[in-house]
Amino acid sequence: MFKKRLYQSISPLLQASIYVSLALLPTSIFAAEKSISELVDAVNGTPDAASREAGKKIKLRNHAKGFCTSGTFTPAANIENQFNIPFFEQQEISVTARFSLGGTNPHASDKGAGRFMSLKIDGDKESLNFVTTNAQLFFASNLEDFFTFQTKVKQGAEGKQWLIDNKPDAKAFFEYVSQMPKSSSFANSRYFGVNSFLFDKPDNSQIAGRWIFEPAAGQTALTQAELATRSDDFLQQELLNRIETAPAVWNLYVKLADSDDVVVDPTILWPESRQRILVGQIIIDGKRDNESNVQQCDKSIFNPVLLPEGIEPSADPILNARTPAYIKSFIRRL
């Protein structure tokens, strides 16, 4: 907790220096199964020195196709009755958002099902970051399986079939994704934090939960006929045009774990019957899009374990590898 508060109190320049220092620490601190460099290479498809060097030259990254915009976060009334998180006592907090597709191809088609939303909510003294996807289910429960999945999918149909035949979690993920609707907008997609966090309650106990963003306007899927009329690049302009008229709004919930729910495995879905607590609203309106931190958000890291007092990461190995992996990828793009 002390280190987190120290980090949040220093300048952006010193923060960048800490990022570099963290990236130089022994990777075994962060990942016992696979090194952070190996994980980044698997995601980027850079398994050797030559491909790694080529990737650096073009600033290779995951979620390469994306854009930044802005808005606000308004905490729910009386949220202090549910959680002991002082961050939520603020009235309105600035948000920087990045909407994206998965993968390293900056020219990927928008006609797939995948949608991603990353957020920085920067309060007076603390920040809360999110890295979310419209797939509620993850494809790996540990770093070895994560590495294997990322390596095999780069091999195309043969690699995917190997995963289906040999990795039950990957098979379940592919089946889940095949049933996902293709939304007509980033604005009418649900988004999920697949990893779990620990939330302080007013009695100073903790409870595990997962983030869920529900679009206030509801979900809207495209039919195949409608999809055929869209370009491969329709999502960005659709959202930017939309928020010129009315903001895109999501209700943010924490879905609470029951006593028998597995907290550290993102491949296991919790039942829909679990209690959900409304935390607040995300309102994306683009009103701060001319600010430099929004315009340059592509050059920053959305750190899902940069958390305010009262929220802590669970022991999920996928979650705890994210930050050092993002840092490693960021350093390679400098």
Image (cartoon, grey):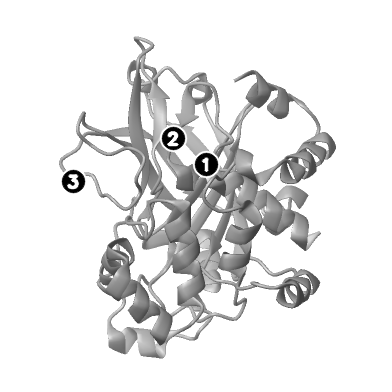
Q: Which mark is residue 272?
A: 3
Please indicate whether residue 188 sits to the left or right of residue 259 in the image: right
Residue at the location (25% across, 49% down)?
269
Residue 96 lies left or right of residue 195; in this view the side is right
Q: Earlier in the sequence, mark 2 or mark 3?
A: 3
Outermost residue, top side: 203
Toward the viewer: 153 or 181?
153
Q: Position of residue 264 (x, y in %)?
A: 36, 40
Give the amino acid type for the residue marked by disc 1 in the picture.
Answer: Asn
Question: For the point 28% across and 69% down, which residue is it?
Answer: 171
Label 1 – label 3 distance at C-alpha:
25 Å
Q: Quadrant of the N terminus?
A: top right
Query: 10 Å neighbourhood of mark 3: few (<14), some, or many (≥20)?
Result: few
Q: Earlier in the sequence, mark 1 or mark 2?
A: 2
Q: Label 2, on which residue? A: 315
Disc 1 to disc 2: CB gap under 8 Å: yes
Mark 2 or 3: in front is 2
> Residue 230, located in which quarter of the rendered image?
bottom left
Residue lying at 18% horizontally and 46% vertically, measured from the top left: 272
Q: Amino acid at mark 2?
A: Ala
Rate crowding at label 2 as few (under 14), some (14 to 19) or many (20 or more) other CA atoms within 10 Å: some
Establish if 158 lies above or below 271.
below
Residue 221 lies, in percent from the top left, at 30, 71
Label 1 sits on a secondary structure element that is helix
Give the Cα distance between marks 2 and 3: 23 Å
Residue at the spot of label 1: 320
Label 1 crowd bin: few (<14), some (14–19), many (20+), radius 10 Å? some
